[in-house]
Amino acid sequence: MNQIRLKLSVMMFLEYFIWGAWYVTMGTYLLQTLKFTGRQSGAAYGTTALAAMVSPFFVGLVADRFFATERIFAFLHLLGAALLFYVSTLTDFVPFYITLVGYTLCFMPTLALSNSLSFHQMRVPGAEFPRVRPWGTLGWIAAGYVVSYLDVGRVATQFHIAAIASIALGLFALTLPHTPPARLGRKVSVRDLLGLDALQLMKERSFTIFVIGSFLICIPLRFYNAFTNPFLTEMGVTNAAAKQTIGQWSEIICLLVMPWFFVRLGIKGLMLMAMAAWGVRYGLFAYGDAGPLVWMLYIGLALHGICYDFFFVSGQIYVDQRAPRHIRAAAQGFITLVTYGAGMFVGAFVAGWIVDMYRINGGQPAHNWTSIWLWPAAMAVFVLFLFAVAFKPREETKS
């Protein structure tokens, strides 16, 4: 491994270690320690979606036009570290939420910046990036093990761990190869940043169904992101954060076997398999427990690779196939806005509202998780039915 690729791999590892250190277990901390409601916890998770909708403007209008990538990357992580330390001291919802919004506005742009920095330093990105990006998944997994075995999922120490890693990455970023602004001297419009040129694809019925379905499927996804750790913890599963990394290991495996399934099932088959897996996973969560039926929870976690990779990666491929060459980047940006932005944002509030519906005051566990998980299971089945009936992709590439 050459020196540049080694540095990029370390960057990816720390980037996703930071995110994984607080994102997985924050729900448990908010519900059990700070006694926030489900709606408040959902809103806290919605900050990443809010920042995902704002970050294209920051990256496209500021970072890519005026600053070297490694310098703005370093600044955002150092500022983010300060905000993480501060958020760890807050116990009231409003200041906690406002500060967390500030932090996610710093962090979310660094996801795109880490990718663009990597691509700029690679001669053959298509061959080299797949060797670098998996280190990010390994960083997320490592964070799960650290938080779990230090047993800090219920306390603010998880933010301290993320902040220390953020300082380390901010300083390390200053040693990364110089990467000048990608759009220096170029005019960039809001239409370009939001990928609105892709709206012309909505004239095609199946593409419209794909966009609607992608938005809807992100609602049950938010249940998993925000409330799996509180669920496992309340059910009495030990080292829950570490066991949740089963999902990340399955992502790596599914990415490796996905080409085999893609040839045999096609895009629609992969997407239907993903949505069926979502329904099965939430059903397993609904009826599993930490005792004799704990295997149901483990299988539910292991399905994450199919649920996530088979839908979202297939969706990216589908968009690339359907979009004319000159608007492919815009189309990918538009789908990202629909899913990671709008879909995740709405999903955070829906999930929080439903979790509050089934709260058991003074109970142990503190929620009726069977009823909670049946909601996203039903949502996934609905989207599955919508896709099965209405989504009829033509998979040839447009010129």
Image: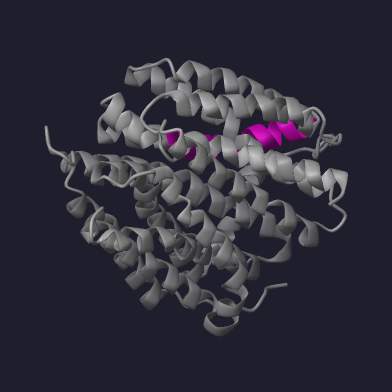
Render colour scheme: one colour
- Is 277 drawn above or below residue 89 in the view shown? below
- Is 314 drawn above or below residue 9 in the view shown? below
Q: Visible in this render: residue 343?
A: yes
Give whichever of 240, 212 is nearer the camera.
240
Q: Position of residue 166 (x, y in %)?
A: 62, 28
- Is 307 drawn above or below residue 143 in the view shown? below
- Is 46 drawn above or below residue 368 in the view shown? above
Give whichever of 326, 348 is nearer the camera.
348
Q: Position of residue 263 (x, y in %)?
A: 60, 82
Relative side of 368 to 389, left or right = left
Relative side of 119 to 303, left or right = right
Query: Which quarter of the figure has residue 324?
Result: bottom right
Q: Is residue 164 magenta?
A: no
In the image, what residue occupies the spot 68% across and 52% down? 133
Q: Visible in this render: residue 377?
A: no
In the image, what residue occupies the spot 49% across and 62% down? 305
Q: Is residue 48 magenta?
A: yes
The magenta stretch spans which residues?
46-65
Give the residue furthest to the bottom.
Answer: 264
